[in-house]
């Protein structure tokens, strides 16, 4: 003799199974997003660090060693680099570039 389950029980089990599958799917989606965010953050930090190193090399090209500690000379040389960079950047103003790079300077000084 085969026992048939009540249709309501089967419907409820199916509903619970679908909800569990949806939870698993969302958990996997969150985990993937977290991993992508971590990778992106590492890439961002590495890029800022590399930018800072290249910026310092470019300063070495412009400033003699004895003027590196002269704030005015440093600011003029930095301005020259920013102006050169702006030739290759579209849609960004010098003010925006300088502001973002000043924030970078604070950030990279913390890292180094």
Image (cartoon, helix red, strand yellow):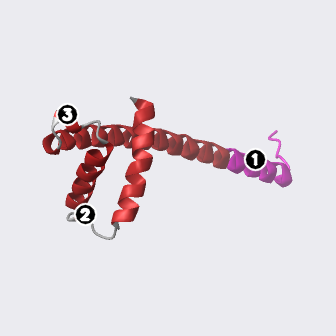
Q: Position of residue 55 (x, y in %)?
A: 25, 43
Label 2, label 1: how far apart the Cα atoms are: 58 Å
From the image, tell me which residue sits under label 2: 86
Label 1 environment density (alpha carbons within 10 Å; few <14, some 14–19, many ≥20): few
Q: Which picture quadrant has residue 20?
A: top right
Tell me the chief SS of the magenta region. helix
From the image, tell me which residue sits under label 1: 16
Given contact means CB atoms under 8 Å apart, are the residues at marks 2 and 3 in contact? no
Residue 88 sits above or below residue 110 on the image: below
Given contact means CB atoms under 8 Å apart, are the residues at marks 3 and 1 in contact? no
Residue 13 is a magenta residue: yes
Residue toward you, 46 or 108: 108
Q: Position of residue 54 (x, y in %)?
A: 23, 41
Which mark, residue 66?
A: 3
Where disc 1 sits, the SS reads: helix
Q: Position of residue 52 (x, y in %)?
A: 30, 40
Residue 76 is a magenta residue: no
Residue toward you, 29 or 97: 97
């Amino acid at each position: 003799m085969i026992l048939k389950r009540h249709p309501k029980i089967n419907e409820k089990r199916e509903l619970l199974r679908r909800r569990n599958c949806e939870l698993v799917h969302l958990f996997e989606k969150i985990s993937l997003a977290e991993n992508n965010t971590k990778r992106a953050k590492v890439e961002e930090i590495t890029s800022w660090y590399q930018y800072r190193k290249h910026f310092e090399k470019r300063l070495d090209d412009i400033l003699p060693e004895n003027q590196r500690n002269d704030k005015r000379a440093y600011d003029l040389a930095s301005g020259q680099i920013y102006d050169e960079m702006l030739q290759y950047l579209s849609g960004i103003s010098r003010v925006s570039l300088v502001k973002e790079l000043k924030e970078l300077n604070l950030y990279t000084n913390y890292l180094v």
